[in-house]
Structure formats: structure tokens, C-alpha cells
Image (tube, helix red, strand yellow):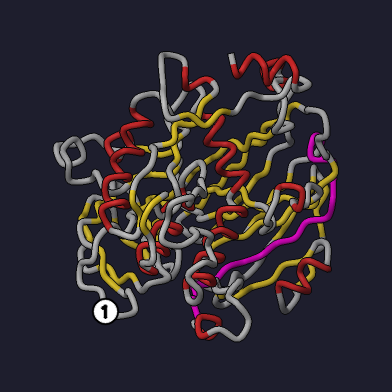
């Protein structure tokens, strides 16, 4: 009934309901909220991880819970760790009516303010990826995926991987859910991280790990959530923002981890109405191919479909994770070859169409409170190539990068 009212009286508004209860069909319109629990303690994080997994396995991909609980609080480490892992969940719900403190990301001061901001900004950048895997969840795999959906074996079919998950096809998340051997600042380690077959990259450093193994003693300073990216990943991004109205809809971004052949389909629609059910949406296929890890071809195919408010004239930024400076970079829009200019900074790249920038290291600590102790913490990952391509009609022209 609530969904019908929203649709009928809300100008074809897409029903979106947060509910504590569920029946057959709830998944069509509802996000299940896990109810009133006590934050500020590790148990709150621990039991929610398998809860989220079970929700997805039950055909209910939209799942949320109060940030750091509706009760309790005043535990900076738990607060930070909850904001970290829920970056890779569909929704973060803030409700703190009976807490020991408000559960806003800045309520406990530094370093929580800076660290929580870093992760919330990251969540905002991931919106195109999250929206695409949300669309997949309509009739495919859930956004939060139990490990046996990636690789079923006697270990993943047991309880050994109940405290980790895949977020879509490319991210493996292993939340910090207990105090293992933390120091007074909350710096700790994470044990029992299972990596499925394939090759995996520590997002924060660029260090590579072979799959089909268990990692122990993985260092997790208070700012670090264990996030592993599967090689071959293609991740649509947008500019960091506080609200979707701040998104630059004339610019698109893709981050690539080239490995063998891989692909990803980006999905978009108007975000508010039911018109997507009438095929008013757009999809973009992105493909990456690495030959012997020496030559890489990245192709962003022409976008198919349209919807009200769709911007078809866009510039394109492609970020490629590499191990060293490339010998040559070529770019094509449609059948025409571009002349790329090498620039010396990200800032110059954004101001210079048809340019590229080689960053020998990438600083990830970009949103810390100015003058705070955390602003002096350097979080650097391995080299990256940035390529900025001029605006074009993305429904008519593909873009190809050769490295």
C-alpha cells in the first residue's frame, strides 16, 4: 500500500521504504533495517556481517542498520570501524535517539572525523559502481555476496568466511569486527582473510596477493579497512560529493586494474521514477585486455539507451593502475586518433582535455580536517596513469586507450 501511494501521488516516484518487518515481496520496494541495537561494542559489528550476508542470500539485497547502533556509543574505535565497512553496503542509516552520543561521523572528534569523512567521500565516489551492482541485484547476485557465490569449496561453504564478503564482482571486504591485538590508538591486525582464486590487490598500497589462500596478521591501522580489489577490475566512479546534486554529470570516471580480459556494464537511469521499467535507462560496456602485462587496451563502448535528464556529451577520465611509467599511450575517440599531451599534475590534467599524467604514487588521504594530526598521515598507493579525454557524444563514439 505504501509503495502504491508513493507511485500514484508522487509523480511516478520510485517506491523506497525502510522497514523492520518483511513478507513475500518486500524486496520489491523495501530496505530492511535490522532494528534497535547497542553500538559502541564489537558485538554490534560482528553479528551484522553475517546478517547482511544472509539477507542477500534470502533475496533481499537492500539491507541497513544504524550507524554505531541506536543505543550505546562513546567508543571511537568501534565508531570508525563501523563507518569503514558500511562504505561497502547499500545504505548507511543514522538514528541515535537513545545513544550515549550522537552518531554523526564527526561526533567523537578527531581522528574519527577525518577517517569517517574519508570513507564517506569514497562511498560517494563509488555511486556509479554501487548503482550498477544494485541493478544487477534485481535478477542476479546481491550487492553483498557471500564468498561461496564467488568460489564454492568446503571452506567457503562452512563458517570460515562469515566475516567477509564481496561487494559486487570486484571488491573483497574483511571488516574489523573484534579487538585482536589493538594498541591504545586502535591500530590492529586482521586474521583469517580468505582470498578466492585469482589475483588480488590491497587497495591502499597496491601490493598484490595470489588467491586461494588465507592471510593472517594483516596490519590494519585505525584508518585502514582491509579492501582487496580483484585484478581485472573495472570500477565506474564519480567526483566526491555530499549529495547527488553535486555530481558532475558531464564527466565520467573509470578506474581499471588491467589483467587478462575483463568487462563491466555500467548502468544509469533517472534515479527517481519508474520509467526504467519502460526501458528508459542507459548502459555502457567497458572492456579491458592486458597482453602479457605489457600492452593494455581499454575500450569504453558507445552508451546504449537514454532517459530523461541523460547527458550524452561527456568528458571521460580513465585511471589505470600500473607498475611503472608506460613507454607510450595512445587514445582514440570513434575512429579518430587524439594527440595526448603529458601534464605534471592531476590538477593540470583536469584543466587540459586530451592529456595524461603519470603519478609515481597516489596519495589517498585527501579529506582530513585541515591542521589535524590525521592530515599528516600519508596513505600512498602504487603508480597510476590518468587519461583525460575531451567531451564527446558518448552515444555515438567509443573511446579506446592503448598503453
Location of residue 189 in the rendering, given as x and y in whole percent from the top left corner: 26, 69
Location of residue 310 in the rendering, given as x and y in whole percent from the top left corner: 81, 35
Which residue is rendered at x = 70% and y = 33% of the image?
A: 271
Front position in the image: 283 or 288: 283
Give the quadrant of residue 147: top left
Which residue position holds label 1?
A: 183
Q: Is residue 33 above or below residue 13?
A: below
* Residue sticking out furthest to the front: 98
Question: On the rendered image, what quadrant is the C terminus found in?
Answer: bottom right
Question: On the rendered image, what quadrant is the N terminus found in?
Answer: top right
Give neighbour class at mark 1: few <14, some 14-19, many 20+ (Cα, 10 Å).
few
Which residue is rendered at x = 42% and y = 64% of the image?
A: 80
Front position in the image: 372 or 169: 372
Q: Is residue 386 magenta?
A: yes
Quick check: can you spot residue 202? no
Front position in the image: 65 or 183: 65
Q: Is residue 279 above or below residue 40?
A: above
Horizontally, residue 352 falls left or right of residue 100, namely right
Q: Secondary structure at mark 1?
A: loop
Horizontally, residue 96 falls left or right of residue 211, namely right
Q: Which residues are magenta?
A: 378-396
Quick check: can you spot residue 42? yes
Location of residue 343 in the rendering, given as x and y in whole percent from the top left corner: 75, 75
Horizontally, residue 138 falls left or right of residue 48, namely right
Location of residue 59 in the rendering, given as x and y in whole percent from the top left corner: 40, 24
Which residue is rendered at x = 43% and y = 43% of the image?
A: 65
Which residue is rendered at x = 51% and y = 61% of the image?
A: 294
Amino acid at each position: 500500500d505504501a509503495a502504491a501511494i508513493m507511485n500514484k501521488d508522487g509523480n511516478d516516484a520510485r517506491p523506497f521504504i525502510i522497514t523492520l518487518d518483511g513478507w513475500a515481496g518486500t524486496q520489491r520496494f523495501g530496505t530492511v533495517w535490522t532494528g534497535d541495537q547497542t553500538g559502541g561494542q564489537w558485538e554490534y559489528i560482528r553479528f551484522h556481517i553475517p546478517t547482511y550476508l544472509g539477507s542477500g542470500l534470502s533475496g533481499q539485497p537492500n539491507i541497513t542498520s544504524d550507524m554505531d547502533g541506536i543505543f550505546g556509543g562513546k567508543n571511537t574505535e568501534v565508531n570508525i570501524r563501523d563507518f569503514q565497512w558500511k562504505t561497502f553496503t547499500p545504505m548507511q542509516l543514522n538514528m541515535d535517539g537513545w545513544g550515549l552520543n550522537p552518531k554523526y561521523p564527526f561526533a567523537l572528534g578527531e581522528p574519527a572525523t577525518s577517517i569517517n569523512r574519508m570513507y564517506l567521500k569514497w562511498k560517494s565516489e563509488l555511486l556509479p559502481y554501487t548503482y550498477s551492482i544494485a541493478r544487477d541485484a534485481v535478477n542476479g547476485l546481491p550487492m553483498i555476496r557471500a564468498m561461496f557465490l564467488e568460489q564454492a569449496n568446503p571452506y567457503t561453504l562452512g563458517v570460515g568466511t562469515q566475516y567477509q564478503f564481496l561487494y559486487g564482482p570486484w571488491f573483497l571486504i574483511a571488516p574489523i569486527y573484534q579487538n585482536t591485538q589493538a594498541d591504545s590508538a586502535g591500530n590492529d591486525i586482521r586474521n583469517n582473510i580468505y582470498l578466492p582464486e585469482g589475483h588480488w590487490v590491497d587497495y591502499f598500497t597496491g601490493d598484490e596477493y595470489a588467491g586461494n589462500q588465507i592471510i593472517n596478521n594483516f596490519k590494519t591501522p585505525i584508518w585502514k579497512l582491509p579492501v582487496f580489489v580483484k585484478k581485472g577490475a573495472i570500477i565506474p566512479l564519480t567526483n566526491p560529493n555530499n549529495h547527488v546534486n553535486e555530481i558532475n554529470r558531464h564527466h565520467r570516471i573509470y578506474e581499471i586494474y588491467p589483467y587478462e580480459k575483463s568487462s563491466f556494464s555500467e548502468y544509469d537511469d533517472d534515479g527517481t521514477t519508474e520509467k526504467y521499467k519502460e526501458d528508459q535507462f542507459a548502459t555502457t560496456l567497458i572492456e579491458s585486455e592486458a597482453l602479457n602485462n605489457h600492452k593494455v587496451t581499454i575500450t569504453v563502448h558507445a552508451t546504449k539507451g537514454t532517459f530523461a535528464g541523460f547527458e550524452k556529451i561527456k568528458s571521460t577520465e580513465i585511471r589505470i593502475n600500473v607498475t611503472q611509467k608506460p613507454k607510450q599511450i595512445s587514445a582514440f575517440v570513434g575512429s579518430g586518433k587524439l594527440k595526448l599531451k603529458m601534464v605534471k599534475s592531476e590538477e593540470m590534467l583536469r584543466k587540459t582535455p586530451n592529456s595524461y599524467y603519470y603519478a609515481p604514487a597516489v596519495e589517498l588521504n585527501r579529506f582530513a580536517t585541515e591542521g589535524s594530526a590525521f592530515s599528516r598521515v600519508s596513505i600512498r598507493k602504487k603508480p597510476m596513469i590518468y587519461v583525460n579525454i575531451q567531451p564527446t557524444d558518448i552515444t555515438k563514439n567509443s573511446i579506446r586507450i592503448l598503453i
